[in-house]
Image (cartoon, rainbow, N blue to C red):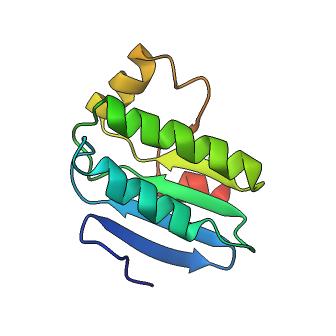
Amino acid sequence: MAASDNDFVRIENPADGVTVLVPTADIDMSRSPDLRSSIKGELKPGLERMIIDLSEVQYMDSSGLATLVEAMRLAKKEAVGLHLASMTDKVRAIFEIARLDAFFSIKDTRQDALDA
């Protein structure tokens, strides 16, 4: 398991070619840049799948959504599978209201994302 550059995003490497990012607090305007930086820093050659585990995120504002949309765009460009996992009901509702749930691969658990 590797440590991240900031206290807000924990980075784990459970298998070759797989990186899991775990934001450890709400994703808002003040924390979105840290998440964006972590995502960009982990999109490296050899990465096959990136999982963003949202189990510790209780709230996400529009800057958080924009950061994840950008992550999806970057992952597609690099041919990396991006999965969002373990969303709380509140965060899932935000994705549904914004109709982003149709564009992201959203898995109920981290294990589901690892198995995908």
Q: Nearer the viewer, residue 5 or 107?
A: 5
- Quarter of the figure with the N terminus: bottom left
| 114 relative position to 76: left or right | left
Q: Nearer the viewer, residue 22 or 33?
A: 33
Q: For the image shown, how many numbered marks are present on the structure?
A: 0
Seen in the picture, residue 9 relative to 99 is either above or below; the reply is below
| 90 relative position to 11: left or right | left
Look at 47% across and 48% down and name the residue there.
85
Q: Position of residue 116 (x, y in %)?
A: 68, 52
Look at 34% across and 59% down and name the residue there.
34
In this view of the protein, can residue 42 be seen by the observer? yes
Look at 33% across and 29% down and name the residue there.
62
Q: Position of residue 7 (x, y in %)?
A: 24, 71
Seen in the picture, residue 52 relative to 64 is either above or below; the reply is below
Q: Position of residue 4 (x, y in %)?
A: 37, 76
| 39 relative position to 65: left or right | right
Seen in the picture, residue 62 relative to 111 is either above or below; the reply is above
Q: Position of residue 55 (x, y in %)?
A: 32, 51
Look at 35% across and 23% down and name the residue there.
93
| 100 relative position to 49: left or right | left
Q: Quadrant of residue 60?
A: top left
In this view of the protein, can residue 107 be seen by the observer? no
Q: Nearer the viewer, residue 106 or 25?
A: 25
Q: Quadrant of residue 48?
A: bottom right
